[in-house]
């Protein structure tokens, strides 16, 4: 059975170069890559090149649950597009579009079959919203 594709997006008040750096640099990833304030991302690695791997550890702050989100890049167009395959074989595409002042990130990914589609969409959207909040609060620090 082919999985459903889900898309989430956010428009962020920052240029594409800033967005790209905050989205791909592990120094920043650990500050935004979680869906709920009761979670955190204590570690991340990211080798941005075709064949390069990424990894982000996501954990409940109380230690009750955690998992590592991993994948391998199959397309990399700096500040424009990332495509990767997750360890379970699902694919995701991230596009960065916009102007000098605003950038829209759109993530389209294959749904997994274990959790409801709405729950997956809401989780990925919450992470992207967290990213938007982080960038807009910290972009002047670059």
Image (spheres, rainbow, N blue to C red):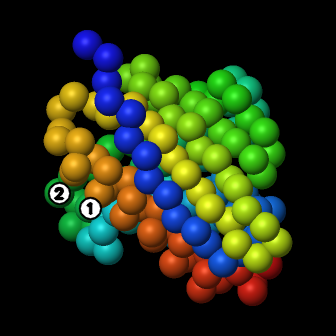
Residue 117 in percent (x, y) is at 23, 42
Quadrant where the C terminus sits is bottom right
Q: How many marks?
A: 2
Disc 2 from disc 1: Cα separation: 6 Å
Q: Are marks 2 and 1 in contact (CB under 8 Å)?
A: yes
Q: Residue at x 62, y 62 (%)?
A: 104
Examine the rendering and report whether any part of residue 27 can be seen: no
Residue highlighted by disc 2:
64
Mark 1: give few (<14), some (14-19) or many (20+) Cα within 10 Å: some
Q: In the image, 32: left or right of 15? A: left
Which of the two residues, 43 or 84, is positioned nearer the viewer here? 84
Q: Does 137 appear above or below 107?
A: below
Displayed quadrant of residue 89: top left
**Circle 2 SS class:** loop
Q: Is residue 13 visible?
A: yes
Numbered tag placed on residue 60 in the rendering:
1
Nearer to the camera, 72 or 114: 114
- Which label sits on residue 7? none
Q: Say if 73 sits above or below 77 in the image.
A: above
Q: Is residue 135 left or right of 61 when viewed as pictured?
A: right
| Image x and y of residue 127, in percent | 42, 61
Q: Residue at x 70, y 80 (%)?
A: 139
- The image quadrant that residue 99 belongs to is bottom right
Residue 91, position as x, y percentages in the image: 48, 28
Residue occupying the point 32% across, 74% down = 37
Per the image, label 1 sits on a secondary structure element best described as strand
Which percent across, then down, holds residue 50? 73, 27
């Amino acid at each position: 059975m082919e999985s459903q594709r889900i898309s989430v997006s956010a428009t962020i008040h920052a240029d594409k170069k800033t967005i790209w750096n905050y989205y791909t640099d592990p120094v920043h990833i650990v500050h935004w890559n979680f869906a709920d304030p009761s979670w955190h991302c204590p570690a991340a690695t990211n080798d941005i090149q075709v064949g390069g791997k990424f990894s982000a550890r996501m954990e409940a702050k109380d230690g009750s649950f955690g998992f590592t989100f991993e994948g391998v890049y199959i397309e990399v167009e700096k500040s424009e597009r990332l495509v990767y395959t997750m360890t379970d074989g699902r694919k995701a595409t991230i596009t960065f579009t916009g102007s000098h002042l605003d950038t829209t990130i759109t993530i389209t990914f294959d749904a997994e079959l274990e959790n409801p589609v709405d729950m997956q969409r809401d989780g990925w959207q919450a992470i992207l919203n967290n990213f938007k909040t982080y960038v807009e609060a910290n972009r002047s620090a670059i």
